[in-house]
Image (spheres, rainbow, N blue to C red):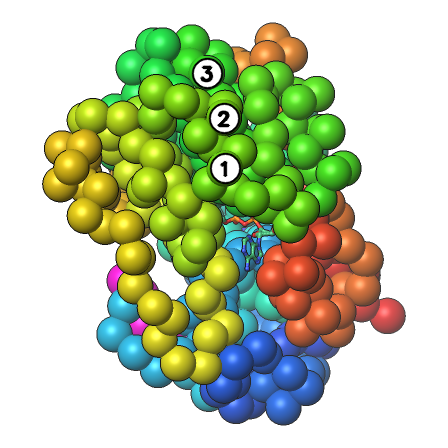
Amino acid sequence: MADITSDPEAQLSITTRQIVLAQRPQGFPDDETWSQVETEVPSPGPGEFVVRTDHISLDPAMRGWLNDVRSYVPPVQLGEVMRAQATGVVTASENADFPVGTAVIGGFGVTEHALSDGSGVSRIDLGLAPAPTWLGALGMPGMTAYFGLLDVGRLREGDTVLVSGAAGAVGSVVGQLAKAKGARVIGIAGGADKCAWLREIGFDEAIDYREEKVLRRLRELAPDGIDVYFDNVGGDILDAALANLRRGARVVLCGAISGYNAESLPPGPKRYMSLLVFRASMTGFVVFDYQDRYPEAVAAIGELITSGRLVARETVLPGGVAGFPEALLGLFRGVNTGKLVLAVEESA
Ligand SMILES: NC(=O)c1ccc[n+]([C@@H]2O[C@H](COP(=O)([O-])OP(=O)(O)OC[C@H]3O[C@@H](n4cnc5c(N)ncnc54)[C@H](OP(=O)(O)O)[C@@H]3O)[C@@H](O)[C@H]2O)c1
């Protein structure tokens, strides 16, 4: 293959900082969990290219990938670079599909530079939306909202939809999509500011679970019950939702962040008999199973963003890869409104 390298940076050897898994955490990840290493990035061979990352995705699922258990993906191994989606720009290339200067997204990990052969890498259109949005509403969280609500939740016009984690990456898209499809939407989030933002972007009602009794508020706001409950958090909020279903309700099991750092198994749902009483279903799903249909969701969400009917918001934290351990904990403290993203500073 012809040498299509043109960036002078490509001629120099590149050192990259990376975060690797040092020790599996019990409970919340801490300083012992991670180590920062510096390593040389090899020059690209035939079919390969080097990416300089600019934004790294922070995802609740990362906590699960640290556990040595059987799951929908293998755990991150000790000594391995932490798995993460990231956006970036191609800086050296021996791959004609990804020439120097191409903006891309892929599973590059928590690193400043990565060598790639193009597997699992896509181009992103920065004219449509900035890089952080490609990790949020136009990325995996947006896909999760779209297929979880429409396929798993089988949303119908006129439904009453309840979504927890509503001010987060997935939840904020779920609520806005549901509104765009003619549903009545109630969001649950932590704090007055988040609830005010939910109303601003079109949610009909918002419940602050830190200040209000969720079950009581739900009975006031949806006396006839909920048709779709999109669950991002599990725990007591799931129980409150189960206690307030409508006949034929669909409970979408997307995630259960309230238990991700628990050191022993959290108690199971107490109200699961509601599924029987209300002839309801509860279905888990993994967004990766919809990969073939991502273009459909990107087109639909992209259209809603450009027509001003869907607000894509991100909370971008500074700190570079060194800030990753602290930034990840931010998800469990709820520091984010919209998608939580880490900005990568250029290496010295
Ligand atoms: N099934 C799939 O394929 C799939 C794909 C992507 C994501 N997910 C799941 O979807 C959920 C949302 O993910 P995301 O990326 O959009 O994250 P996110 O909602 O943007 O961020 C996490 C949010 O969770 C809330 N939270 C943290 N601890 C909580 C607790 N103890 N109780 C209640 N809420 C808590 C916080 O908001 P507050 O301030 O409101 O508490 C925080 O901002 C997660 O459970 C994730 O695992 C599933």
For badge 1, the amino acid type reads Arg
At x 59%, y 85%, the residue is 33
- Residue 77: percent from left, percent from top: 42, 82
Residue contact at pointers 2 and 3, CB within 8 angstroms: no
Does residue 336 belong to the magenta stretch? no
Nearer to me, 94 or 145? 145
Mark 2 burial class by Cα count in 10 Å: few <14, some 14-19, many 20+: few
- Residue 243: percent from left, percent from top: 33, 41
Tell me the SS state at disc 1: helix
Residue position for label 3: 184
Mark 3 burial class by Cα count in 10 Å: few <14, some 14-19, many 20+: many
Q: CA distance from mark 2 to mark 3?
A: 14 Å
Nearer to me, 149 or 189? 189
Vertical placement of residue 296 versus 340, above or below: above
Task: Determine whether the beta carbon of the residue marked 1 sits less than 8 angstroms from the nearest atom of ligand 1.
Answer: no
Q: How many marks?
A: 3
Tell me the SS state at disc 2: helix
For badge 3, the amino acid type reads Arg
- Which stretch appears magenta? 72-76
**Circle number at residue 216:** 1
